[in-house]
Image (spheres, helix red, strand yellow):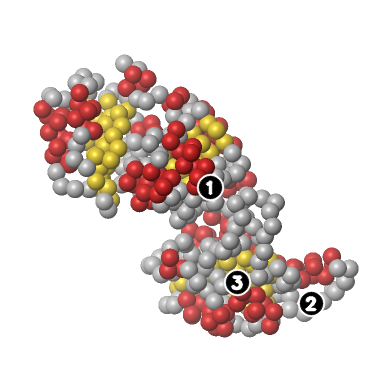
Amino acid sequence: MTEQETSFPKGKMNVLLLEGIHDQAQEAFKEEGFPVESFKRGMGEEELKERIGEIYILGIRSKTKLTAPVFSGAKKLLVVGAFCIGTEHIDLAAASKRGVAVFNDEFSNTRSVAELALVQAASLLRRLPEKNAQMHRGLWNKSVDGARELRGRTLGIIGYGKIGSQLSVLAESLGMQVIFYNTSETLALGNAKKAESMEEVLRAADIVSIHVDGRPSNRNLIGANQFELMRDEAVFLDLSRGFVTDQEALAEYLRTGKLKGAAIDVHRSEPEGNNVEFTSPLQDLDNAIITPHIGGSTIEAQEDIARFVSGKIASFINSGDTRLSVNYPEIQLPPQPDAHRFLHLHRNVPGVMAEVTSIFGQRGINILGQYLQTSGDLGYVITDVNKEYDKEVVEELKGVTGTIKFRVLY
């Protein structure tokens, strides 16, 4: 019995990739046998609602918003790949309700973001943006005034996750002292010092770098009150989320000279595409670096993200593996070529396992292995059975109480 006879053929599983996801992902999906359509741009809600009904695998980056109305029409969608770190632009509850697994990559662009933060910090300490702007205006101003090295400076990190902790290690290697604040318990790397509050970091640091996630409590985290606490002529960096920093207040503190300089890579309103008009309160300030959300935009990072997320999706389709899924209960299993595999996602209510096991028992089907994991409102059970089974068992399993999505592999 071939895979074609028992699993839905990959040649009919349409893949849609948006926002210029690296070609490495497209190549990986094609090698797996999936038909792939790729666009450089994103899609709005209405366009997605028109397309989503025929898509099995969807790949996006950070600009495409997947809302409940979009998921409501996703009749065939099995999995979404977020080829980025954050998933706040995806309605995860709606995805789970529809039985759609979501995978992202929290690791691959950490080096790129950390390197950019260091480059920006060094540029601001040496007053390179100002010197560059003066030279473009035809003014030669060779002066040591205010120019500092990274070595010996104190770096304060707000948010000591994957990016913040890697930045910490790189900074120490350049001779910097590191102090950090994180809302959850985390291990300090190297000689970094954990602060008891964000305010302690703001007061102590020559350079403050923000690396928090997209949770609602981080909205408007940094404003005039926080800038007031910072050292005179400190440097401020934000490479996290556009809603974290009050950029109007930041601009005022840069104009007065309270802050030496700032670098902002994220913005409250970011255009959907390139080569369009953009405005910022920091424009025309020579001591501000403003970049178009390019923290993770290196060839290395995008290749790694494309490889990682496409690999997780392929593993989910091929074996039911949900390790590192954002919303599914996590189960990691190798392929089982000598058995049929039943994948059953259900609401996490009492009695489901008993009902599933009872169906196999009544049909006299030998269970070779069974694995259950629950998370919140979801339960995910994988059952491997021998080759001989009554086809009617599939319809019975689809009818189990609380079933959200059911698939047969092999």
**In this rendering, would 129 be left or right of 170?**
right
Q: Which mark is residue 44?
A: 1
Q: Residue at x 36, y 21 (%)?
A: 3
Q: Residue at x 37, y 20 (%)?
A: 4
* CB under 8 Å between discs 2 and 1: no
Give 76 or 86, whichever is nearer the viewer: 76
Q: Residue 175: image x %, image y %?
A: 61, 69
- The residue pinned by badge 2 equals 144
* Real-space Cα separation, disc 2 to disc 1, in angstroms: 50 Å
Residue 314 visible within the image: no
Q: Residue 5: image x %, image y %?
A: 34, 19
Query: Split into 4 quadrants, where in the image is the N terminus?
Result: top left
Judged from the image, the secondary structure of the residue bearing numbered disc 1 is: loop
At label 3, the amino acid type is Gln
**Between discs 2 and 3, the one toward the N terminus:** 2
**In this rendering, would 263 be left or right of 59?**
right
Q: Residue at x 43, y 65 (%)?
A: 216
